[in-house]
Image: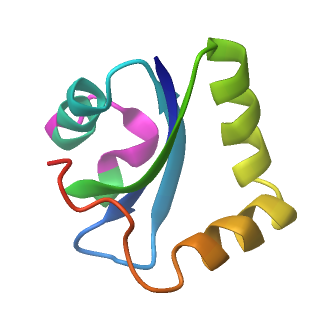
Amino acid sequence: MYYAYVAQSIAQNDKFYKGHTEDLHARLKEHNRGTTKSIKHLIPVRIIYYEGFDSLAKSIETEKYWKTAAGRRYLRSKLSNGPVVQWIE
């Protein structure tokens, strides 16, 4: 299973990172260890939303969509009541 996900900075809760991975838990640990240069300034982070896919290509396509204006509107509507995912730490 592959995932497209949204991570939110805990310290700066208006900052988000969109990515894709095959293992959400391992990727979150990598982020919070500071091994991802593009998100290092946002740590600590938590995953607040994700969608699962059978193919890597679809997870990458979804991540790219979320980075567009339409994709940001889609995420805003999904997250309007707060984080969807509570358990990934």
Q: Please state which of residues 33 and 68 is positioned toward the viewer in this rendering.
A: 68
**Residue 4 image offset from top left, x and y in percent:** 54, 37
Viewer can see residue 44: yes
Name the residue nearer the viewer: 30 or 81. 81
List x then y, in percent, for residue 51: 53, 42
What x and y, as percent, mark residue 26?
Answer: 22, 25
Q: Is residue 38 magenta?
A: yes
Can the viewer see residue 6? no
Instruction: Answer above or below: position of 79 versus 80.
Output: above
Q: Residue at x 37, y 71 (%)?
A: 83
Relative to 10, 64 lies left or right: right
Name which residue lies at 20% across and 48% down.
Answer: 88
> Which span is picked out in magenta?
33-40
Give the residue at x 31% y 31%. Answer: 24
Q: Is residue 5 left or right of residue 69?
A: left
How many numbered badges does the structure rendering display? 0
> Please, what is the dominant secondary structure of the magenta stretch?
helix
Where is residue 23? Give x, y as percent. Answer: 32, 22
Residue found at x 48% / y 62%: 16
Q: Eyeballing the image, is 45 above or below 13?
A: above
